[in-house]
Amino acid sequence: MSNKQAHKRIIQGVVATKTGDKSVTILVERRVIHPRYRKIVKRFKRYIVHDEKNSVKVGDVIEAIECKPISKRKAFTLHKVVSVGVEL
């Protein structure tokens, strides 16, 4: 048998809020073509990401990797910090 690892999604987004201890909310933007008007429109979705070391701040761009569910809405962990942003 081959020990094949399951595909894990990696998402990239901007840290919107620090929701609690060891948790951040990121805003992921994707661009899709509108089915009728054929115009590129932005779609946004928020994900809650587990940050074990509380190392990220609001405004940072991070990558998160899919993991087993940690809580009801948290199923991603911090993979790496892409760029450090400016906290407003």
Image: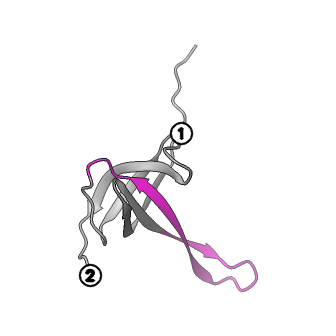
Outermost residue, top direction? Answer: 1
Residue that protrudes farthest toward the right in the picture: 36
Q: CA distance from mark 2 to mark 1?
A: 36 Å
Which label sits on residue 57? Answer: none
**Residue 27 x, y percent position in the rendering:** 46, 69
At x 34% / y 53%, what residue is drawn?
22
As displayed, is residue 29 above or below residue 24?
below
* Mark 2 vs mark 1: in front: 2
Main SS of the magenta part reads strand
Instruction: Give x and y (percent) for residue 63.
Output: 38, 56
Image coordinates for residue 70, horizontal then vertical, percent: 48, 44
Q: How many marks?
A: 2
- At which x and y percent is residue 7? 54, 39
Q: Which residue is mark 2?
A: 88
Secondary structure at numbered mark 2: loop
Asked whether the beta carbons under mark 2 and mark 1 sit within 8 Å of each other, the answer is no
The N terminus - image quarter: top right
Disc 1 target residue = 7
Region of the chain picked out in magenta, as a range = 28-53
For the residue labelled by badge 1, is the local secondary structure a helix, a strand or a loop? loop
Of residues 49 and 80, the one nearer the viewer is: 49
Q: Amino acid at mark 1?
A: His
Residue at image location 54% in from the left, 34% down from the top: 6
Which amino acid type is marked by label 2? Leu
- Tell me the crowding category of disc 2: few under 14, some 14 to 19, or many 20 or more residues within 10 angstroms, Cα based: few
Q: Is residue 52 left or right of residue 37?
A: left
Q: Earlier in the sequence, mark 2 or mark 1?
A: 1
